[in-house]
Image (cartoon, rainbow, N blue to C red):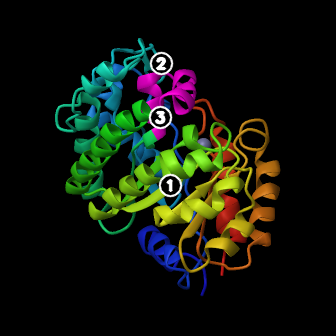
């Protein structure tokens, strides 16, 4: 097959099923495209559906990759009752730790996707983008992982302690988070989302043991993935942070795409998941994409593609979320290199 015979959407859908494709798909990944439309990352931008849609659309046009990527699936923590600080030009942060005991966990509010001011803007942006994108390209959303949200509500360090001293408290918070994730996914699905990205660095081996992962995190991640799929979206799970020790367990989530950091070799992951799930990622976001040059990125991406055994079932993308200040020319070089070396 010669190149560019398929639409972006057809290419991704076929790659996920290990079917023949014209070339490997590539995702620019997840970073705020606010500066592409001369906006600051502040509350006014994050709640402006038109601006979000325009920024994401411009980013797809500019990088010319295989997906439209919505940033940040809302700030559910606020809906749980947390108060946030909104910087002038950055992502919001939680001001106070909300859950320090069982009473506080019981008192958590039930997040409503239709009342979350950031998420309602994202839902509206999804609808706008779905109309614009038609059948050509997928609109891809973002819902944080269960442990990531729980850690923001409990404080990461505290949560790590509770895992040893009061696991029931962690379960209580995760139960509420997983239910909320499913509700958010349903709302996303109704707006027409086609893929949901879920990063969960806090349950990665960099933070907890594989045994704790299986007992404490995996059951909720399974539910979240199923919720995404029931909503009609492909589930792309990113178990960020030294993934090899849990690579035998993550398959139980039954995600459609496993999105790995640069600490995993994409060809090795592909051999493990062949015909079960697509694999994605592994382009080094710091050494090559942030500090490198387009030439260095080109060489790096070529190496990743050349080592793949199958010329399908893989999506090239940055190994993790990128800084909003990432070098656009390097991200573009990753896209171009995939188009060049990923041809079938
Ligand atoms: Zn990551």
Residue position marked by numbered label 2 in the rendering: 89
Spatial CA distance of label 3 from label 2 is: 36 Å
Residue position marked by numbered label 3 in the rendering: 167
For residue 237, which numbered disc appears in the image?
1
Q: Nearer the viewer, mark 2 or mark 1?
A: 1
The majority secondary structure of the magenta stretch comes to helix
In percent of width and height, residue 40 lies at 44, 22
Looking at the image, residue 307 lies above or below residue 108 = below
Local crowd size for mark 1, using a 10 Å CA cut-off: few (<14), some (14–19), many (≥20):
many
Name the quadrant containing residue 145: top left
Quadrant including the C terminus = bottom right
Who comes first in sequence, dot 3 or dot 1? Answer: 3
In percent of width and height, residue 201 lies at 57, 40
Looking at the image, residue 297 lies above or below residue 339 = above
Check if mark 2's residue and mark 1's residue have beta carbons within 8 Å: no
Who comes first in sequence, dot 2 or dot 1? Answer: 2
Spatial CA distance of label 2 from label 1 is: 28 Å
For residue 312, which numbered disc appears in the image?
none
Q: Give the range drawn in magenta.
A: 147-167
In percent of width and height, residue 194 lies at 34, 61
């Amino acid at each position: 097959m010669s190149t560019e015979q398929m639409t972006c959407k057809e290419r991704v859908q076929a790659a996920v099923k290990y079917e023949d494709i014209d070339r490997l798909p590539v995702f620019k990944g997840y970073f705020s495209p606010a500066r592409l439309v001369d906006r600051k990352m502040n509350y006014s931008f994050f709640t402006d559906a038109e601006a979000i849609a325009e920024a994401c659309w411009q980013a797809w046009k500019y990088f010319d990759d295989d997906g439209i990527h919505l940033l940040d699936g809302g700030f559910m923590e606020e809906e749980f009752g947390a108060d946030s600080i909104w910087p002038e030009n950055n992502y919001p942060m939680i001001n106070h730790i909300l859950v320090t005991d069982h009473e506080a966990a019981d008192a958590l509010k039930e997040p409503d996707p239709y009342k979350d001011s950031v998420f309602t803007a994202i839902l509206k942006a999804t609808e706008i983008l779905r109309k614009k994108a038609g059948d050509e390209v997928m609109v891809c959303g973002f819902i944080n992982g269960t442990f990531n949200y729980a850690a923001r509500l409990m404080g990461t360090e505290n949560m790590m302690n509770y895992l040893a001293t009061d696991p029931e408290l962690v379960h209580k918070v995760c139960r509420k988070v997983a239910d909320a994730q499913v509700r958010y996914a349903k709302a996303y699905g109704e707006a027409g989302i086609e893929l949901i990205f879920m990063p969960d660095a806090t349950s990665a081996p960099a933070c907890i043991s594989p045994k704790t992962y299986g007992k404490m995190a995996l059951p909720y991640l399974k539910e979240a993935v199923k919720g995404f799929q029931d909503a009609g979206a492909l589930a792309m799970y990113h178990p960020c942070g030294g993934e090899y020790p849990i690579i035998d367990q993550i398959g139980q989530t039954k995600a459609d795409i496993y999105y790995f950091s640069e600490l995993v070799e994409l060809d090795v992951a592909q051999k493990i998941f062949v015909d079960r799930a697509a694999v994605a990622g592994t382009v080094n976001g710091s050494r090559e994409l942030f500090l490198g040059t387009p030439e260095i990125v080109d060489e790096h991406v070529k190496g990743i593609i050349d080592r793949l055994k199958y010329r399908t079932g893989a999506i090239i993308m940055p190994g993790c979320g990128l800084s909003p200040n990432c070098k656009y020319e390097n991200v573009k070089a990753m896209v171009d290199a995939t188009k060049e070396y990923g041809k079938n």
